[in-house]
């Protein structure tokens, strides 16, 4: 049996977690799951253009583990693009440093430390706030 591994540190939850080819209903597509830690590896290596050592330190994992993670994530992304699959970003053994809150009323997006709760939108004072970290923790 595989021993449990330490949680992978993720800066903040993905703002979007469902992608699919336009014009094709989800029921007609195969789904592929990209874990949140794989998403973070893509963000750090390919979007932020970080070296594997620096990115692995931010995620609190070893460099070889980061390299395996990014290779797996890239393989999944290639499959989604080539085969036209639906992509869902969810799951993984993760801990967030920050949270993202999105207001349903005005669309405002705010980033806060994970232990700082946001109850009202600072722009429109709405209480219709989407807690993105909570979405990913509930779906892990």
Image (spheres, helix red, strand yellow):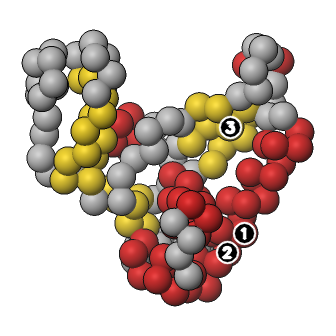
Q: Where is mark 2, residue-wise? A: 68
Q: In which quarter of the image is the N terminus?
A: bottom right
- Which residue shows up at 14% across the image and 51% down it? 115
Distance of mark 2 from mark 1, alpha carbons? 5 Å
Badge 2, how many Cα within 10 Å: few under 14, some, many 20+? few
| Tag 3 near tag 2, CB within 8 Å | no
Q: Is residue 57 above or below residue 128?
A: below
Q: Which quadrant holds residue 11?
A: bottom left
Distance of mark 3 from mark 2, alpha carbons? 20 Å
Tag 2's secondary structure?
Answer: helix
Circle on res. 44: none
Tag 1's secondary structure?
Answer: helix
The numbered mark, 3 or 1, whose residue comes first in the sequence reads 1
Q: Where is residue 121 in the image (x, y as percent from the top left)?
A: 16, 25
Q: Determine if residue 119 is in view.
A: yes
Q: Determine if residue 37 is in view.
A: no
Badge 1, how many Cα within 10 Å: few under 14, some, many 20+? some
- Taking the image as shown, residue 28 lies to the left or right of residue 50, namely right
Q: Where is residue 71 in the image (x, y as percent from the top left)?
A: 72, 69
- Which residue shows up at 81% across the image and 52% down it? 78
Q: Where is mark 3, residue-wise? A: 87
The numbered mark, 3 or 2, whose residue comes first in the sequence reads 2
Circle on res. 71: 1
| Tag 2 near tag 1, CB within 8 Å | yes
Q: How many marks?
A: 3
- Which residue shows up at 48% across the image and 79% down it? 56
Distance of mark 3 from mark 1, alpha carbons? 17 Å
């Amino acid at each position: 049996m595989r021993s449990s591994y330490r949680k992978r540190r993720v800066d903040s939850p993905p703002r979007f977690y469902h992608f699919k080819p336009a014009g094709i209903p989800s029921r007609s597509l195969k789904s592929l799951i990209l874990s949140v830690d794989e998403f973070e590896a893509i963000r750090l290596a390919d979007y932020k253009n970080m070296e594997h050592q620096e990115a692995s330190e931010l995620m609190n994992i070893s460099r070889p583990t980061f390299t395996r993670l990014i290779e797996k994530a890239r393989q999944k992304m290639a499959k989604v693009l080539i085969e036209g699959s639906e992509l869902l970003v969810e799951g993984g053994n993760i801990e967030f440093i920050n949270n993202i809150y999105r207001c349903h009323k005005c669309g405002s997006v705010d980033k806060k430390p994970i232990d700082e709760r946001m109850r009202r939108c600072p722009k429109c004072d709405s209480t219709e706030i989407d807690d993105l970290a909570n979405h990913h923790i509930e779906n892990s």
